[in-house]
Amino acid sequence: MPKKLVVQKYGGSSVANVERIQRVAQRVVSYAKKGFNLVVVVSALGDTTDELIELADQIDAAPSEREMDMLLSTGEQISVALLAMAINKLKKQAISFTGAQVGIITDTSHTRARIIKINTDRINKELQLGKIVIVAGFQGVTLNQDITTLGRGGSDLTAVALAKELKADSCEIYTDVEGIYTTDPRIEPRAQKIAAITYDEMLEMASLGAQVMQPRSIEVAKKFDVPLHVRSSFSLNSGTMIIKEVKKMEDVVVSGITLNKNEAKITLCGVPDKPGVAVKLFQDLAASGVSVDMIVQNVSHTRQTDISFTTTKIDCGKASKITKKVAQKIGAGEVLIDEDIARVSIVGVGMKSHHGVAAKMFGIMAKNKINIEMISTSDISISCIIKKKYAEMAVKKLHAEFGLNK
Amino acid sequence: MPKKLVVQKYGGSSVANVERIQRVAQRVVSYAKKGFNLVVVVSALGDTTDELIELADQIDAAPSEREMDMLLSTGEQISVALLAMAINKLKKQAISFTGAQVGIITDTSHTRARIIKINTDRINKELQLGKIVIVAGFQGVTLNQDITTLGRGGSDLTAVALAKELKADSCEIYTDVEGIYTTDPRIEPRAQKIAAITYDEMLEMASLGAQVMQPRSIEVAKKFDVPLHVRSSFSLNSGTMIIKEVKKMEDVVVSGITLNKNEAKITLCGVPDKPGVAVKLFQDLAASGVSVDMIVQNVSHTRQTDISFTTTKIDCGKASKITKKVAQKIGAGEVLIDEDIARVSIVGVGMKSHHGVAAKMFGIMAKNKINIEMISTSDISISCIIKKKYAEMAVKKLHAEFGLNK
């Protein structure tokens, strides 16, 4: 029977220093001794990437993206070489590769490249020789041999793509937390580690503020049905499985509660209530690259209405400038900026088959005298914008009332 | 008329920090503005290589050489990316490459690989597009896509090999000194910068202790007749040309004086004076990888003789152990170790056509009461082993008496 293949990915905090690299090496070797074939994807050591960005910034605040990729890709190359040495030191043969060497071919969109194909010949050859293969995460190479990087969370993507391409039996994402929690344990200590969650729920949670994995790699995992196991590199406990479908003992409606404090609300008051007015505002925002999230337009009682939308705090300055310009042009009133807000969301595939989940959420907010300023819903999530000072309380109350304080 | 092509190489001290990288960028751009095509070879930033070696050493004192090359090659990759950014910032287009990307193909001898061939297609393409091409020194790639490094002084070798392959009009080696001096200016302040020196003299001086360039790259330059210009990255003065033949106004016999304090002398006393005894000693030394330099065997007055040889201080411990073992085996006497020696050498192609140069050197030593312990000669050099405490004095006296204090 052929050996089972495990793809493991270790993030920057798991390889932040020599001691941690040695610990990762021990874990990798323990798997090899159990008889697995191993492909290990590694991020750059701790703060290396930030240090390299800082160096580049001293030279040019807006450097060539191709050169930026050339620079940043060295971070992972250092990690893989050191990890291979640490594994060799434990008397197991390891061999390290850059993205280019293992044939992770991408398009030419430097700093956010997309993987086009992976040529797995070299990896398979080394696995057959009994070696543990270490691959630099986050990077690839164009057909023209230029080095590219895959953007934020790129190492996760490398691991998922390799797992798919190599038809791995499992893909483990090692991080500095024990897995995915029902909510942020720093807010609600009774937060529970989730044993299993669907790709869709994870995607929703990631886009609503859960920091563990980037949406892009989850999308790829979902597309090719690669089961992911998110777990801690500091313990042997099992973490959270991210899979297609979760069969649960009980009827779980809400899987997790997320909180995002990085948004701001902008309100344009006194907008003439006639067709085509809102269009102008959101066209101008889009043209400037401002990403708009929730949009609410009040029912009009007079000939005027108010339009509110949320954007990231980073885009807020740009967005408010554009909104003020549009206000003048269309003869609207005041523009209000509120950075003192938070978005609290409940996520769960169970919502699809349950009625009254939104009503229950709003009821919990009302019972606790938390005013809801904006609402947005998807198939499997409901989000409320509330005053920031109530954010933690709202998370705790929702966590309890939706039965997550096991 | 096609543009002239200049290959420039900048060492680690020339790119030790952001400010120096920016200064190198300015120099490169000034050449581009004069209408030259430029290929720029760069070493790793200042102490980067040492820091990476230190990291590896914490993991394994004897790491895999392949992984060591993987690790160390990141140093130059960082430099080239930063230099390309700094040049771009000055509004000239630059593009950086690793050794692998520009097709510097080597054999598989990791940490000391030899260049087999260079595929210059990509470089020529970018030059034709009007770009300044920045190449990582010190590194190459095997036909199997494994990253290699070229050993000490490898960046010089990269520059020389590229100059040869691209048929460059000149090859400039930038360093932190103004050129090659008649002797070390820290010892003799009246040392003169040499305007031009032959490959052979430079080779001899490098192997006898002059630190500016590694012998290997000079050998390659000699083999393919690539004229080198060694000069300072901190000034605009011209430095030293290293060329095939130097036509001099006057009849210069001695071009330079070198000093090497890194050797030790080992003497095996009371060796039975019969054929084959010395063989055993030097076979055993060679088998252990000890490099032996000068060897002197005294004329025998009795049935016994003494054999002295020099080796590097690093190899001295190993060498003395082996010598003591051999002494026991062959029934010789005491083994004396003297680390308190220095080698002073005079170098010059003029010696070939002048008699009495050795006699003059020995006379200068005698006049200054410096005892000569060992002597060794080549076509274009004479070396004396003397007590270390006389080393600086000997250099100054020789420098003056051979007419180098212009």
Image (spheres, coloured by chain):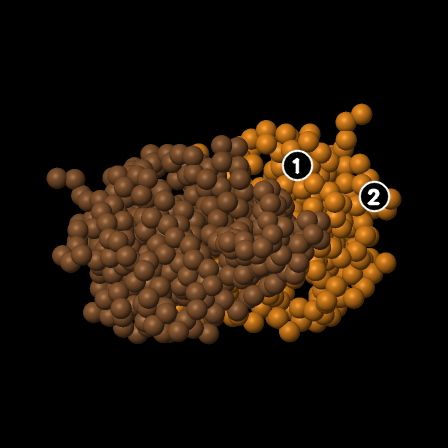
Chain colours: A brown, B orange
Q: Residue at x 82, y 39 (%)?
A: B34
Camera sees residue A128: yes
Question: What amino acid is found at the position of numbered circle 1 in the picture?
Answer: Ala
Residue type pointed to by label 2: Lys
Q: Residues within 10 Å of mark 1 (few under 14, many from 20)?
A: many
Q: Position of residue B137 (x, y in %)?
A: 58, 46
Asked if the residues shown at circle 2 and circle 1 are in contact, with their CB atoms under 8 angstroms apart, the answer is no
Residue lying at the far front of the rendered structure: A302
- Protein chain holding label 2: B
Q: Is residue B267 above or below residue B279?
A: below
Give the foreground label among 2 and 1.
1
Residue shown at 47% from the left, 69% from the top:
A387
Task: Bin the neighbour count of mark 2 within 10 Å (Cα to Cα): few under 14, some 14-19, many 20 and up.
Answer: few
* The image quarter in which residue B375 lies: bottom right
The residue pinned by badge 2 equals: B248
> Which residue position holds label 1?
B163
Quadrant of res B135 = top right
Question: How far apart are the alpha carbons under marks 2 and 1?
Answer: 26 Å
Query: In x, y percent, where is residue B124?
Result: 64, 30
A54 sits to left or right of A257: right
